[in-house]
Amino acid sequence: MTSIIIACVLIAYFGVLLAIAYLTSRNASANSFFTGDKKSPWYLVAFGMIGTSLSGITFISVPGSVGDGGWYYYQMVIGFFIGYFVVAYVLLPLYYKYNLTSIYRYLEYRLGFSAYKWGAAYFILSRTLGATVRLYLVINVLQLFVFDPLGVPFWLATLLIIGMIIAYTLQGGVKTIVWTDTLQTLFMLLALVVCIFSIQSALHLEWSQIWTQLEAKDMTKLWNTDPLKKDFFLKHIIGGAFITIAMTGMDQEMMQKNISVKTLKDAQKNMVIFSVVLLFVNALFLFLGGMLHLYAKQKGLDLLPDDVFPTIVQKHLPFGIFIVFIIGLISALFPSVDGAITALTSSFCIDILGFERRTDLNEMQQRKLRKTIHLSFAFVFLLLVFYFKWMDSKSIVTLIFQIASYTYGPLLGLFSFGILTKRVLKNYMVPIVCIAAPLICYFMNYYATTFKDGYTFGLEMLIINGAITFSLLYFTSSKSINN
């Protein structure tokens, strides 16, 4: 009976998304899918980006990490906050100046066709891997608590969820995503607040008592001052800033909704307000994590970090709270996947197939081809989720996020080179540099344990990768020609 109720909730939730998709995709042109007709309200984009930035991994893993790492994660959040201002006042003005649909067209205007293609290719690789990891982790949780009790196998559950995402993104694109992400962010934040109050009630403690106990158990520690550790505070803050610059400001998924806002001023307003709200929301997730670990210790529970939140909510709180948790989890999952498929489709159509250049395709042909690409990326997501399940190893997740620091490094180097210099690239050197830089970083990371008493690379690997890319581009380029 419990599983049937949850299934009904999921169906109703999906029905709401489909209704939004229907309303927002009416009278949409082929270009609406990519740009939202440049009419997206900035405040909706700002609010919806919270859900896109946090994802299902944040919903599950950040609270679970508090038991061992306290608030160390918040060091990185502070870095994120700094990075968003760079995105707002350095990158967004460039994108609006050139009136871009794909942000990688900037690389073509400034550095040439080869840099443009390689930038787009690295985005497609990075976002495909990152989004499918998030999808895989959340489907695993849903499989355990929802689909297994209903007798639905993993492959069918994955197919159903991806099918749902396709159903409401295939037609409307960005125009639909802006509204669905707003609704889903609202559900996710409501679930977060409800779970915090429910845990506080279950602990039978006042808020001040909870904080005192968290401090006593070292679950509020914020600064790691050991420079050899990967979560050393300077690594986290500086690395977090560059992660935001690269993985938000140079990421088509994150920027696609921002540049769908009518004016640059509104887009900047969106980014600044969003960055402030994100400080508060991440603090709530960490506070919730501390409360969950207090409850686990109170009840003598020995749980893995990623199991703390779902297990306590399912087995130790009222059933209604578990329903709210499931809604929050799905609301965290969908924005990080629906936007990814939409952005990947946009990038492939514009950057790889050259929709903006081609005169041999009319609007109907473009629409048909775009839907084929959209379905193809969904199929790739399906295959990768099955692959991760077959590997059945959480180390795969760690590996994918390490790969992200390698794949976004060349993007960081290319954009930085274009913005900070006036030099001219040799097109034939771009692929050599974009392959060589991540390989150098890989070997540095591989042999790091033999240096400096086992130095551990953390978030700074992205910066190093970008710096190597920048340096190689600089030494293989030539001086600019005036005008």
Image: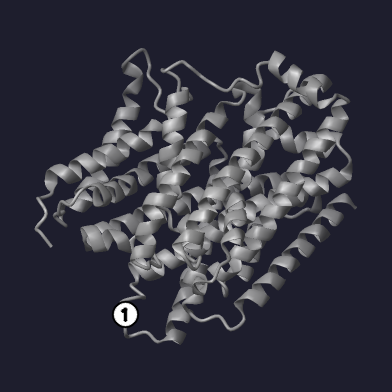
Out of 44 and 346, give the one closest to the viewer.
Answer: 44
- Percent position (x, y) of residue 274? 57, 49
Q: How many marks?
A: 1
Classify residue 292 by image quadrant.
top right
**Quadrant of the frame with the C terminus:** bottom left
Element at label 1: loop
> In the shown orientation, is residue 285 left or right of residue 107?
right
Mark 1: give few (<14), some (14-19) or many (20+) Cα within 10 Å: few
Question: 367 or 160: nearer the eye?
Answer: 367
Kindly tell me whether residue 301 is visible in this rendering: no
Q: Residue at x 60, y 59 (%)?
A: 43
Q: Position of residue 330 (x, y in %)?
A: 69, 52
Residue 243 in sight from this viewpoint: yes
Of residues 160 and 411, the one nearer the viewer is 411
Render colour scheme: one colour
Amino acid type assigned to the residue bearing label 1 in the image: Arg
**Which residue shows up at 69% across the image and 17% down it?**
215
Q: Residue beneath label 1, please? A: 358
Expressed as whole percent of the image width and height from the top left, the position of residue 379 reads 52, 63
Residue 309: x and y, percent?
Answer: 73, 35
Name the residue: 66% across, 21% down: 219
